[in-house]
């Protein structure tokens, strides 16, 4: 029983670490985008395809140019989105 409780404690801590991770929208792959709230597999791939076709994003708000990405998704994830590695950039 103690092992099971320990397992769930570690799992809880790891999920908090993953959810707090900041991603660079200009280098992230689809699996990184899927960690964002409101972004599933389809939207994640759409972001990567958009970036490949049109080049790097100049601002966080440029994500709204991707079909299915709007103000709500950006607002929900603004602390996790960055244009540079390891530094969150507000929209």
Image (tube, rainbow, N blue to C red):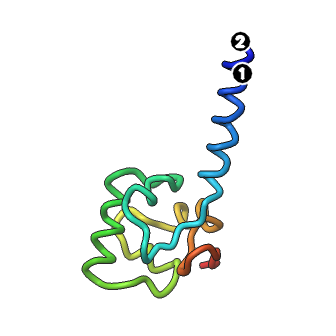
In terms of depth relative to the viewer, which is nearer, 89 or 65? 89
Residue 82 position in % (x across, y down): 56, 75
In terms of depth relative to the viewer, which is nearer, 7 or 53? 7
Query: Of the numbered discs in the image, which one, if any, rests on residue 1?
Result: 2
Q: Which residue is mark 1?
A: 5
From the viewer's perspective, is residue 46 above or below residue 37?
A: below
How would you rate the neighbour count of disc 1 (Cα within 10 Å): few for under 14, some for 14-19, many for 20 or more? few
Which residue lies most toward the right here?
Answer: 2
Q: Quadrant of residue 5?
A: top right
> Which secondary structure lies at badge 2?
loop
Seen in the image, is 24 located left or right of residue 43? right
| Image marks 1 and 2: residues in contact by CB distance under 8 Å | yes
Which quadrant does the N terminus fall into?
top right
- Label 1 vs label 2: CA separation? 6 Å
Q: Residue at x 36, y 71 (%)?
A: 66
Query: Of the numbered discs in the image, which one, if any, rests on residue 44?
Result: none
> Which secondary structure lies at badge 1?
helix
Which residue lies most toward the left here?
Answer: 53
Q: Residue at x 44, y 74 (%)?
A: 63
From the viewer's perspective, is residue 67 above or below residue 9?
A: below
Which quadrant does the C terminus fall into?
bottom right
Seen in the image, is 43 located left or right of residue 81? left
Q: Residue at x 61, y 68 (%)?
A: 78
Which residue lies most toward the bottom here?
Answer: 58
Residue 44 position in % (x across, y down): 37, 59
Seen in the image, is 84 located left or right of residue 47? right
How would you rate the neighbour count of disc 2 (Cα within 10 Å): few for under 14, some for 14-19, many for 20 or more? few
Residue 27 position in % (x across, y down): 42, 74
In terms of depth relative to the viewer, which is nearer, 59 or 7? 7
């Amino acid at each position: 029983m103690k092992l099971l409780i320990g397992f769930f404690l570690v799992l809880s801590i790891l999920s908090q670490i993953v959810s707090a991770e900041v991603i660079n929208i200009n280098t992230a792959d689809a699996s990184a985008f899927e960690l964002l709230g409101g972004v599933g597999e389809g939207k994640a791939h759409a972001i990567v395809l958009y970036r490949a076709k049109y080049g790097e994003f100049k601002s966080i708000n440029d994500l709204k140019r991707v079909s299915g990405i709007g103000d709500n998704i950006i607002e929900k994830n603004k602390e996790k989105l960055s244009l540079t590695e390891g530094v969150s950039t507000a929209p």
